[in-house]
Amino acid sequence: MKKNNLKAWLYLLPAMLFLGVFMVYPLVDVCIYSLEENFHFVSQKYTGVGLGNFRHVLTDPFFVMALKNTLILVAITVPVSTGLSLLIALGLSSVKKVKKLFQTVYFLPYVTNTLAVGLVFWLLFKNTEHTNGLISSLLSMFGMEPINFIEGQYWQKMMVTCLYTVWIVMPFKILILTSALASVNPEYYKAARVDGASSGRIFRKITLPMISPTVFYLIITGFIGAFKAYSDEVALFGTNLNAAEMNTIVGYVYDMLYSDSGGYPGYAAAAALLLFGIVFTITFVNLKFSRNKVQYM
Amino acid sequence: MKVVLENLTKQFPARSKKDRDVIAVNHFNFEIPDGQLIGLLGPSGCGKSTTLNLISGLETPTSGKIYFGDEDVTALPPEARGVGLVFQNYALYPHLTVEENIIFPLQNLKGAKKMTKEEMHRKAVETAKLVQIDALMERKPKELSGGQQQRVAIARALVKIPRVLLLDEPLSNLDARLRLQTREELRRIQRDTGVTTIFVTHDQEEAMSISDLIIVMKDGVVHQIGKPQDVYDEPANLFVAQFLGTPQINVFEGEIRNGRVRIGDEDVLDAPGKADRSVWVGIRPEGFIPDPDGPFTCRMDRVEVMGRDVSVVSTHVKMTGKCVRSIVSAENRFEPGQELVRFRLKPYKVFLFDRESEERV
């Protein structure tokens, strides 16, 4: 028995080494960093241990802005993208003739590079010397002043960001939901129709419960993904997100580490742990809340 | 509720350009009397289920009409027809309890028929009692046995008192014992409720044993309609004769000559008033009487003892199957090593079919 155990540990060793070096050690290190006050990178010295980093981060107006941006993004994009994806998936599963074409079209954003999508959004929304952006041009046809969304007011930038995020996360959700819808036995629909259920009731009482595990999975991963937003903002507004007022928590962490204002691993670690705390809490609440709603067959 | 099908046809488009369109149901005409249990019988792929779907409204006919009573329901969607349908795999909603499953159709009622929660509950319990599952109301479908699931499916179909109850292969998912028991149950439930019931099956024994009326179909065409015994005793054509009865009817190449039926070189039976022609001679297994002086000679193969009866397996040069199977009383004795066996035939167990059209002569 003991010999066998030894063998098992031996087999696990490579994976454990790998995970230990690249997962466990950094995780522990982040926690340590977050508690070391006034850590200096070059001299590797710190002045004390405590919650100073957290205090600093929480009172830093840039972090507060990043937190606000992230929360707005999450609150808007997760429900909107999941709802829209469900609608499109429902539509896709009811069309017959050009289904393949539509599926391909809807999946294209998923295989497109974030920065390339950013470029497309610039063409749509940004004012340059040559053009006012497609959307502005369209608006001006109705007699409206051209709007520079990318460099405009806060809500305009936020709107474009939300649009961008929703657009880029939808393909995956549509794909997953389409397959979930396809896996529902059509006999249930037939039975429900014979039983006299309206299509709205069939959706609420049959379809939704049947695909609820998938919807739930998408909501949880959607929350987590949205909280980690960063690259989308860079694609739209460049790397100086603080100046654009569009920074996110992950962006703040990056800034604290590497950018011109960087070199503060303690602040970065504290901000990262705060993000972890938020994501953890929300996922926990999600799990609790959905226990009675999600039907695992 | 009387159900009338008038020239009902359902054509499915071909899958590819090379194939031809499939006519699943071909000019059906029949009338199902009120309050009876009807067996829709035929081999797989003969269009039974399509017929059922047409009656339920899940499929729309290519042409023809469907009437419930005097009302033309052809254009009505399934929810407006007031039918109850039991699927082959029951299609119980897996996330709902038994009670919620049974109540589901009641919750869909609108307008004047709308019920309060108490009424629905009372109705569900009442129906559950009818099919004897009232002790299982809180369970989920996966916690039930196949037989119990089926009762729930029947209860769900019955709870809103349908004008017509339709069952698609209701017994095929049950084991042999349960199948016998459930078919009696089905008969009882149908009698108790008096709902016109149509069930689809490929099992002729099942259909014959409980139906008031059977409809035999093949390749989308109705071959015969009648009381089970009548259809068995007077098959309209060779297909019906072969499809009904176990063991199967024995079929021989034969001919009618001068008012006599000939199989090979033996005159086996009188056929008065019938014109000379080539025929298929169908003889039911119970139509043979062993008789040393009988006119019909077969080559003995073996005797299978079944207690009350004896099954004599023999061969004949003009037979079409693998062997000739006759069921005779166990009082007949057969010598071991006996090479030939001679039979007399019961005239009412012998059917003649035209060689070309296979219709009854």
Image (cartoon, grey):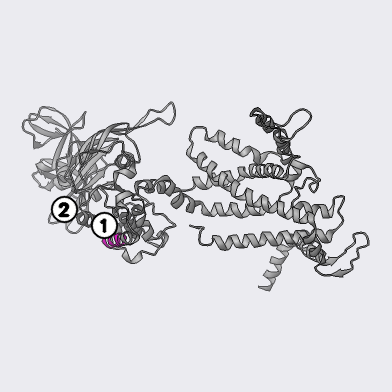
User: Residue at the location (71% across, 60% down)?
Assistant: A276
Q: Which residues are magenta?
A: B122-130
* Crowd tier of the residue under label 1, counting other residues whose Cα lies within 10 Å: few below 14, some 14–19, many 20 or above: some
Asked if marks 2 and 1 touch (Cβ < 8 Å), the reply is no
Q: Is residue B279 above or below residue B165?
A: above
Residue sticking out furthest to the left? B272
On-image quarter of the N terminus of chain A: bottom right
Question: Residue B268 falls in which quadrant of the image?
Answer: top left
Please state if A291 lies on the left or on the right of A54 as rendered.
left
Whether residue B320 appears in magenta in the rendering, the answer is: no
Residue type at mark 1? Leu
Residue B180 circle label: 1
**Who is closer to the viewer here, A44 or B284?**
A44
Q: Secondary structure at mark 1?
A: helix
Q: Is residue A96 above or below residue A73?
A: above
Q: Is residue A102 above or below residue A291?
A: above
**Who is closer to the viewer here, B210 or B66?**
B66
Residue B334 circle label: 2
Residue type at mark 2? Phe
Please state if B169 lies on the left or on the right of B35 as rendered.
right
Question: Residue A235 falls in which quadrant of the image?
Answer: top right
